[in-house]
Image (tube, coloured by chain):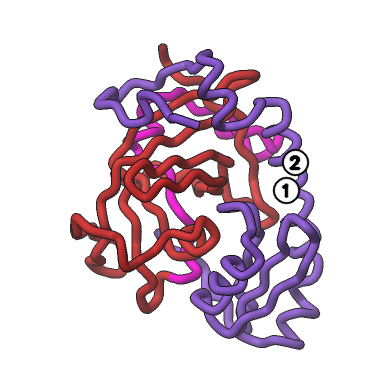
Chain colours: A red, B purple
């Protein structure tokens, strides 16, 4: 079982490890669990924490959100979630946002590219947020 | 250490038991401890937010793994401080000291 948590504001998060092979970066990321997001997105707050060099981002793609269309940069990535005593691995095309107006404070999003590979139990009243990956 | 099979075309979750992966990502038990410590740092920073927001309105605050409180006027400036301190990637907890917080609509 992969265990997430609710922040003080009641926001669902899961802690992960992220590996970006091309950039040779391995680090920790908190993802907001977002069933509305098609893809997993890394926003500047976590990008800064990981030390991602914006100048080295390539492969621009556009993604549309509720406030309009933004440019992200596609990057092959491995997301690892702690599942009991092992790491559960997901290979994804991560979309990274460079620092841009209005996005600095946004959380990074764990989208359906990962979530649709798991069963999720979202039980805010009891504070339980759990995921079971399908083998 | 060489990282093997790091990028594959698999779109299915893979349960990793390979010792190299464990060595690379860290022992799961240690990682769990590290996650708990990061959660505690987040709680500490959350507790400090009202006072910090008064002192440093609309700036950025971070608490590092070694307990240093960093304040910077921008996320880029904060990232520069992380580089100078060589903080482990993703190890800091970060908050914007928002004097006019707006709920997210994602």
Instruction: Indicate yes or no whether the magenta region holds residue A132.
Output: no
Look at the picture and state if B88 lies above or below A106. above
Location of the C terminus of chain A (image quadrant): top left
Q: Position of residue B37 (x, y in %)?
A: 77, 45
Q: Foreground residue, A59 or A65?
A: A59
Q: Residue at horizontal 71%, vertical 61%?
A: B64
Q: CA distance from mark 2 to mark 1?
A: 5 Å
Q: Which residue is mark 1?
A: B39
Left or right? Give the position of A96 relative to A108.
left
The residue shown at (51%, 15%) is B18
Residue B63 placed where, x, y %? 72, 64
Mark 1 Cα shell of 10 Å, populated few (<14), some (14-19), many (≥20)? some
Residue B36, numbered label: 2
Q: Quadrant of residue B45?
A: bottom right
B27 or A96: nearer the eye? B27
Q: Residues within 10 Å of mark 2 (few under 14, many from 20)?
A: few
The residue segment tinted magenta is: A104-130
Residue A20 image offset from top left, x and y in percent: 39, 44
Could you say whether the residue bearing mark 2 is in a helix, strand or loop? helix
- Of all chains, the one bearing label 2 is B
Q: Residue drawn 64% across and 78% down?
A: B97
Say whether marks 2 and 1 touch (CB < 8 Å).
Answer: yes
Secondary structure at numbered mark 1: helix
Residue A118, horizontal then vertical, whole percent: 43, 24
Q: Which residue sits at x=66%, y=59%? A: B93
């Amino acid at each position: 079982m992969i265990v997430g948590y609710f922040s003080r504001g009641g926001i669902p998060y899961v802690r992960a490890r992220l590996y970006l092979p091309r950039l040779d970066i391995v680090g920790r990321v908190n993802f907001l669990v977002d069933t509305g997001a098609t893809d997993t997105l890394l926003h500047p707050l976590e990008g800064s924490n990981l030390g991602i060099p914006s100048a080295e981002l390539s492969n621009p793609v556009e993604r549309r959100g509720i406030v309009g269309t933004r440019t992200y940069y596609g990057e092959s990535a491995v997301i690892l979630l702690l599942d009991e005593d092992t790491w559960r691995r997901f290979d994804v095309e991560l979309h990274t946002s460079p620092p841009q107006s209005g996005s600095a404070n946004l959380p990074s999003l764990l989208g359906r590219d990962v979530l649709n590979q798991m069963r999720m139990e979202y039980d805010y009243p009891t504070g339980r947020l759990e995921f079971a990956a399908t083998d | 250490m060489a990282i093997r099979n790091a990028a594959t075309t698999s779109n299915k979750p893979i349960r990793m038991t390979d010792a190299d992966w464990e060595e690379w990502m860290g022992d799961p038990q240690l990682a769990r401890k590290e996650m708990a410590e990061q959660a505690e740092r987040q709680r500490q920073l959350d507790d400090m937010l009202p006072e910090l927001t008064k002192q440093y309105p609309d700036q950025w605050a971070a608490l590092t793994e070694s307990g240093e409180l960093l304040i910077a006027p921008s996320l880029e400036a904060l990232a520069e401080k992380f580089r100078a301190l060589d903080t482990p990637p993703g190890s800091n907890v970060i908050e914007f000291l928002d004097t006019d917080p707006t709920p997210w609509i994602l």
